[in-house]
Image (cartoon, rainbow, N blue to C red):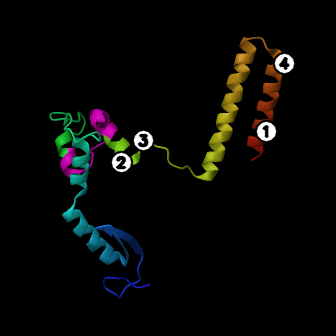
């Protein structure tokens, strides 16, 4: 499939535009997609979007505390600068602007906690380690409460898991 704009290069980027409730699909080459992206950024910048989302609450568009005067102690970025450029200066900015970023992140991502995916292999390894730690915690509690039969079963389960882990 060739690019819808230039008609020369293969289309590698596929966009769906919705304008006036009309859906249009665009199939673009990398160069045309880059130009289209730059045009969209000029028309409606990311920083404008973030600024708009940061200043108004959902419930009625009332202006909130805008964070005037809040500054990152490490890099010196102000919250007003963040709203202009749409990027934080360093990792400490998250702490400095926490009060203002939490609602913004919740609106954008639906949550303030990262809940992304992990690679399957890593997930399995982590699950085994968590299961093993859970068994050790239960063993410790069983010993403290003098439930020695339960402790012996847990000890055997732990040894079995450790054998499997060392064999792999």
Q: Earlier in the sequence, mark 4 or mark 3?
A: 3
Q: Please give the residue where the numbered disc 3 appears in the rendered image.
A: 111
- Which secondary structure, mark 1? helix
Residue 149 numbered mark, or none: 4
Q: Give the x, y percent position of residue 74.
A: 25, 36
**Which of the two marks, 4 or 3, is nearer to us in this view?**
3
Of the two numbered discs 3 and 1 on the same chain, state the one appearing first in sequence.
3
Q: Do the numbered discs 4 and 2 sit on residues whose CB atoms are within 8 Å?
A: no
Q: Earlier in the sequence, mark 4 or mark 1?
A: 4
Considering the numbered disc 2 on the image, is that residue within a helix, a strand or a loop?
helix
> Which of pointers 4 and 2 lies earlier in the amino acid sequence?
2
* Residue bearing the label numbered 1: 163
Q: Dot 2, crowdedness within 10 Å: few (<14), some or many (≥20)?
A: few
Q: Which residue occupies 31% across, 42% down?
A: 104
Residue drawn at point x = 19 percent, y = 37 percent: 66
Residue range of the region highlighted in magenta in the rendering: 82-103
Name above or below for residue 125 compared with residue 3. above
Dot 3 falls on a residue whose secondary structure is loop
Q: Height in image: 29 above or below 99?
A: below
Residue 108 shows which numbered tag? 2
Which disc, if any, is residue 63?
none
Location of the N terminus (image quadrant):
bottom left
Residue 26 sits above or below residue 20 on the image: below
Q: Is residue 89 magenta?
A: yes
| Residue 114 lies within the magenta run | no
Q: Quadrant of residue 45?
A: bottom left
Residue 133 shows in the view: yes
Contact, mark 4 vs mark 1 (Cβ under 8 Å)? no
Q: Position of residue 154 (x, y in %)?
A: 78, 26
Q: CA distance from mark 4 to mark 2?
A: 52 Å
Cα distance, mark 4 to mark 1?
21 Å
């Amino acid at each position: 499939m060739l690019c819808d704009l230039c008609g020369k290069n293969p289309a590698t980027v596929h966009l769906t535009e919705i304008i006036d409730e009309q859906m249009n699909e665009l199939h673009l080459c990398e160069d045309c997609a880059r130009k289209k992206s730059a045009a969209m950024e000029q028309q409606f910048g990311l920083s404008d979007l973030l600024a708009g989302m940061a200043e108004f609450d959902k419930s009625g568009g009332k202006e909130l505390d805008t964070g005037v005067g809040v500054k990152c102690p490490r890099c010196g970025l102000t919250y007003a600068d963040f709203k202009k450029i749409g990027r934080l200066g360093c990792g400490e900015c998250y702490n400095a602007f926490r009060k203002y970023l939490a609602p913004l992140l919740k609106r954008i991502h639906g949550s303030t906690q990262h809940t992304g995916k992990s690679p399957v292999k890593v997930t399995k390894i982590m699950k085994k380690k968590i299961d093993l730690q859970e068994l050790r915690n239960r063993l410790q509690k069983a010993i403290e409460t003098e439930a020695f039969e339960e402790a012996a079963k847990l000890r055997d389960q732990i040894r079995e898991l450790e054998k499997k882990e060392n064999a792999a």
